[in-house]
Amino acid sequence: MQFHRPDSLDAALEVLANEPVRLLAGGTDFFPALAGKTTCDPILDLSSIGTLRGISEEAGVWRIGATTTWSDIRDARLPAQFRALQQAAAEVGSLQIQNAGTIAGNICNASPAADGVPPLLALDADVEIAGPKGIRTEPLCDFITGVRRTQLKSDELVTALNIPKQPDGRSCFLKLGARRYLVISIAMVAVNVTTSGDGCVTEISIAVGACSAVARRLRGLEQQLPGTVPGSAELAHIVQAADLSELTPIDDVRASAAYRLDAVRTLITRAVKHAVAGET
Amino acid sequence: MAIADYEPSSCVSLELNGRTIRLDGPPGERLSFALRERAGATDVKVGCDAGDCGACTVLVDGEAVCACTTALGQVDGARVETQAGLVRNSGIAKALANSFQRHQAAQCGICTPGMMVAAVGLLRKKAAPDETDVQDALGGVLCRCTGYRKIIDAVMDCEISDGTPSGGVGVPMARVDGLPKVTGSELFSDDVASADALVLRVVRCPHHRASFTFGDLEAYRLENGLDLILTAADVPGKNCFGVIPGFEDQPMFAEGETRFRNEAVAALVGPGELVNALELAHFPVTFTALPHALTPDEASAVDDLHQERADNVMCRGFVQKGDATAAMETADVVVEGRFSTGFVEHAYIEPEAAFARRVGDRIEVRCCTQAPVMNQEGLAGLLGLSKEDVRVIPTAVGGGFGSKLDLTAQPYVALAAWILRKPVRVTYSRIESITTSTKRHPSEIEMKIGADREGNIVAVEFDGTFNTGAYASWGPTVANRVPIHASGPYLTPNYTARSAGIHTNTTPAGAFRGFGVPQSALAQEPLYDDLANALGIDRLEFRRRNALKNGDPTVTGQVFETGMGIVDCFDALEPTWTRALKEARDFNARGGPVRRGVGIAGGWYGCGNTSMSNPSTIKAGVTASGQIVLHQGAVDIGQGSNTVITQIFATALGAPVQQIELVGPDTDLTPDAGKTSASRQTFITGNAARLAGEALRARILRLANVSAEAELKFADGIISVSDDRDEREIKLATLEPDSAEYVLEVAGTYDPPTKPLDENGQGIPYAVFGTTAQMAELEVDLELGTVKLLKITAAHDVGKAINPLLVEGQVQGGVAQGIGMALMEEFLPGRTENFHDYLMPTIGDVPPIETFILESGDEHGPYGAKGLGEHCLIPTAPAIMNAIKDACGARVAHLPATPDKVLAAIKAVKRA
């Protein structure tokens, strides 16, 4: 078994260019997918590449390195626009999962119920990808293409998530599951809201997870909410009546499709209110 | 450029518990496997191999991670700490071990390493954590025994203290067998194999029902370097086992046709590195799927699973008293309903594992089991040996709850070791464990209850269908028990109850804490609420009015003149009930989408086998040096029998608990104490221990010729015996020894007095019933259907609490399982086969639990003690269901009450 453990991105890219490998970072999706077996495939472990981990601020953009763990994100001092992402970080699996699991691992695993994806969608995150031809970026909403499918090519790896600064943004993440910890979402909602001086919504992004093959932004509803007041009956009414045809939930062991659609409307209304009020 | 390239078997260097070690293994291997198998750190437990249970939690550079989702190669140069090392090296961990013992935060002990490691990770960062801190830090470690509350207490009270007192009956002492569990030295079933053991894996059928043929097995064996391939053709005895006489119907390997998904068809044996790496999809077997049934509804449409059981009916149960049909006509109020529950998985954190070796012409099997002697008999039958040629040595058992009564992994290693004359081990994966072990029976119940205007029950009609799966296991017990218990602990003059166990193509349903009684209570208790509400009577008062009192006949006509304690249970709850109802009213008056509800339910359970002999024997002795030895064969699966039986024996003998050395369980060393099930060990083995202790005391008193009140002291080959008149010394070396081991040797045997039931189910099924009532307080979110538990209050009449600390532990653990059954747990074959999809409560799902221990005594129990294990979860789920209805007006009659079902019920009420 080849086990590559480079400490630089260039070295990692060279391995990728030479042979097909399995990418390993936190291991929290890598090992469960093996269902108890030990793989004999070559492995490229990214956890020693220091430059891939950490949160930094650049002109107009926040950069979250690919192997930044959920605990790193949960405990970081970040502005209010990141509240939803930090709430999601605290809801990922368990402390053990948060200590090991990485942000890029979460999006590359491309589970419909990935906790990190709705907040990142609501924050308009871009995915930074390194490959033999250099660096490219893709909007997260395009990067994940289906259940367990992404745009990532076999000779590429994700290096960071880039998130535009939005100093007035306030966000909230709500996860609905059948137990407190270690739970796969029935549905989850992330919103990022800006409001005017009179408390009305001026801009809003809304993303929903576990209700479609890939978590989705609700662009139609986002257009309907500016001008309404978070917590108001008017806003709740619009959400209740909204066309949510972007969502295509399924019946599974966790809940029925009809329930998911119902619950999402409640979660959106509450998340908008909580985002503005700064409540959990 | 720095690339560390590891060859297939190159060394990884790490600091393990303060010592630098080098491990020679594939760097892509799970750290959990490497630590256990290569570094000998068996205190790292493996429960799921997928990060879902946290049993393998270790600290890597100070941070808690699951070793099963970490690659060995990733810890090169890292600092790794495990439970045993922490307790050796860290003051915090030493204090935590002390606190875990003091609070009884470890029951079976299998989750304890993960819990303690995660807790040390927290305590190093925050010395005085609050409850939420503890829950957040330990939320990734599942526990199935404790209900988590004592773990929270232990972490929040982490300091060295003198600990609990020590003593006999009535003393809340710490477990006598607790220290290995909190220091990481306890050996469970996967921790005992010798280094040279071959590894066995089982080949299983992926279909619910299938015919199958093998290809060239010998070619496959040679190609893969295996020592042995086993199939049904290799079984020397009868390829058939079971637990109820007349219902032995389960093959060790299927013959020609499989009857449930993942049933065994073959086993492979060879060196671990070869067998573990095998891709079983290439094994030469061809399956042809056959029409199957997964529910009783579908069962009549498929071919009978067992020839002698027409229409797939395994057996039926029946109890009748008075004339329920006629009496129902006279009732002022009649309520009825249909209720159902699904399969519930036992979800012990220790998957089944076993290790066998041949010793001459005997076979020795070390395994996790609740029933060593039954296992011994079953193995003898399969291997074609006499019982005496099979030795079963139970390891520590990482949770059982009924499922580890049946044979699972043991026969495979026993047969392989027998044939090969080499030691052989097997460890089930979590998926193998969940898909092939027994389950709680799914139930479909119709029930009708009538009461008069004053609120007295006049008639009950009950009809329950139970999905018993592909094989009988303990299904007949469920079919028999349910009609005896379905009335609940209430006076029911006219009663008809029928039950049926139906075969389907699912893993067998068997024994699970309560044997069908929790399911029947989920019909009866909600209907009691309906009656109380229809009559305008307070729900607690309605139950108390109907509760059995001393002198009342049960539905089988049995009359208890003493010890019927259910009224006391309701009395104990009344102040809490009144407070909770008022708080809920006040809360709900404020409006909003969240509503509070309060529910109550009663329960009862007969201890021991139903109308069958089920004796226990305890042997004890005193050596020439004065050491008291107790041969205790009742398996402690976490519930505490090692402690309770010792306390009873100590009291009967009149000796300090600390002076008693425990031996066993081991079928060569301990007499048969029966199985650990049916809440029988405290009652039955406890009585055997009492009789043994009394017999030994009587021998000593006779030797010293002193009065019955004399005090005994054991030391240095002398028993000093003193009473107010005299002090004598018995010099043990001067006595003629009773046996090679003991100067004085005694045994005590107890078999509870029961009588067979007649054709109407009338008779004396149990010598003892324990009773309970519990309350649930909770909030329902009317918009999401989510349920948040606020508090469970449990009142239990245990007759006499031999150890109040352990009583609380049993209650809290049972309540947690009841919570899971109520709100989240359901095994669906092919769908919820791991701990990712099968949800059980985490540390954040169990609210504070208050326990009222009531002691109304018992005619038969040792010092008046009754059994308790099963009782704890029987009223929990019904109380929760009743509280949900109280909060939102909606009844969820089909469990589990997941948010979608609760919301659907709320909407149905709104529409109506």
Image: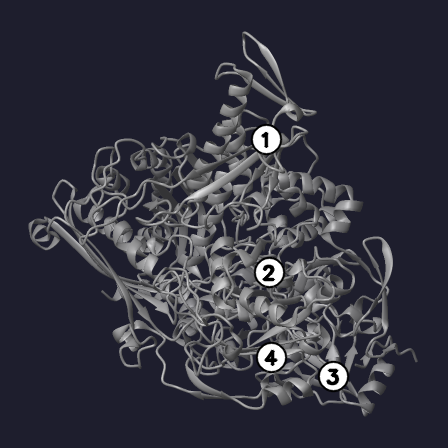
Q: What element carries label 2?
A: strand
Of all chains, the one bearing label 2 is B
**Residue B321 relative to residue B521: left or right:** left
Q: What element carries label 4?
A: strand
Three-letter residue code for mark 4: Ile
Pointer 4 or 1: first along the chain: 4
- Mark 1, other Cα within 10 Å: few <14 / some 14–19 / many ≥20: many
- Above-or-below relation of A193 to B220: above
Q: In the image, which is nearer the foreground, mark 3 or mark 2? A: 2
Pointer 1 or 2: first along the chain: 2
Residue beneath disc 2 = B362
Q: What element carries label 3?
A: loop
CA gap, disc 3 and disc 2: 43 Å
Q: In the image, which is nearer the foreground, mark 1 or mark 2? A: 2
CA gap, disc 4 and disc 2: 21 Å
Three-letter residue code for mark 3: Asp
- Above-or-below relation of B275 to B96: below
What's the residue at 74%, 69% (across, down)? Answer: A68
Residue beneath disc 3 = A41
Answer whether labels 4 and 2 touch (C-beta < 8 Å). Answer: no
Q: In the image, which is nearer the foreground, mark 4 or mark 3? A: 4
The answer to whether dots 4 and 3 both sit on one chain is no
- Above-or-below relation of B97 to B396: above
Q: Which quarter of the picture shows residue A202?
A: bottom right
Answer whether labels 4 and 1 touch (C-beta < 8 Å). Answer: no
Residue A169 in view of the camera = no
Q: Mark on residue B657?
A: 1
Residue at the front extreme of this rendering: B736
Q: Where is residue A44 in the image (x, y as percent from the top left)?
A: 78, 80
Q: Please give the count of numbered marks on the rendered protein.
A: 4
